[in-house]
Image: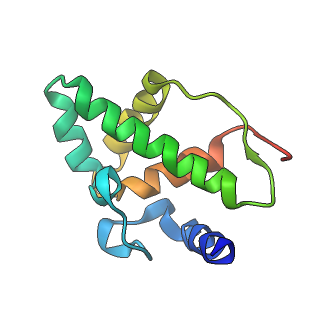
Amino acid sequence: MKKALVLLLAMCAPLAHAQLSDIPFLAHGAGSKTCGAYLESRRIPNKGTDYQYAQWTLGFISGFNATTKGPQIDEHRSIETVLAYLDKYCRENPLHAMPAAVVKLIDTSPKRKP
């Protein structure tokens, strides 16, 4: 099971420019949306929707940390920080899949040895 999760995360590397149809796995919840859909949902203030996207992102990061043998994400991410990052990424890449935004967040985050 753990090897399958590591393989899954390795498959995420090409997501840096991925559209929803390019994702090599089936994402559920907020991860099944495009950045454009995310931005549309953010136009109408709704703490529940904001929380859903932020928690999905933090869960994806936790999954990365749980399955990697390399450096892990070592920075506490508040919901506001996660949403600010997703807002910026998605404005620049509205056709990309949400997992692509999170993979980019992981790639640019400070890391530490487990």
Residue at coordinates 23% horizontally, 48% vertically from top-left?
36
Residue 91 pos. (x, y %): 32, 40
Residue 13, x across and y down, in percent: 58, 67
Q: Quadrant of residue 109?
A: top right
Q: Residue furthest left?
A: 44
Total numbered badges shown on the rendered structure: 0
Q: Residue at x 24, y 39 (%)?
A: 39
Residue 4: percent from left, percent from top? 61, 77
Q: Position of residue 75 (x, y in %)?
A: 68, 31
Q: How is the image coloured?
A: rainbow
In this picture, residue 51 sits left or right of residue 45: right
Residue 79 appears in which quarter of the rendering? top left
Front-lying residue, 53 or 40: 53
**80, above or below 63, in the image:** above
Instruction: Name which residue lies at 24% across and 29% down.
Output: 48
**Residue drawn 49% across and 25% down?**
81
Compared with 12, 76 (above or below) is above
**Extreme residue in the front direction:** 1
Query: Against 49, is 56 above or below?
Result: below
Image quadrant occupied by the N terminus: bottom right
Q: Is residue 112 left or right of residue 102?
A: right
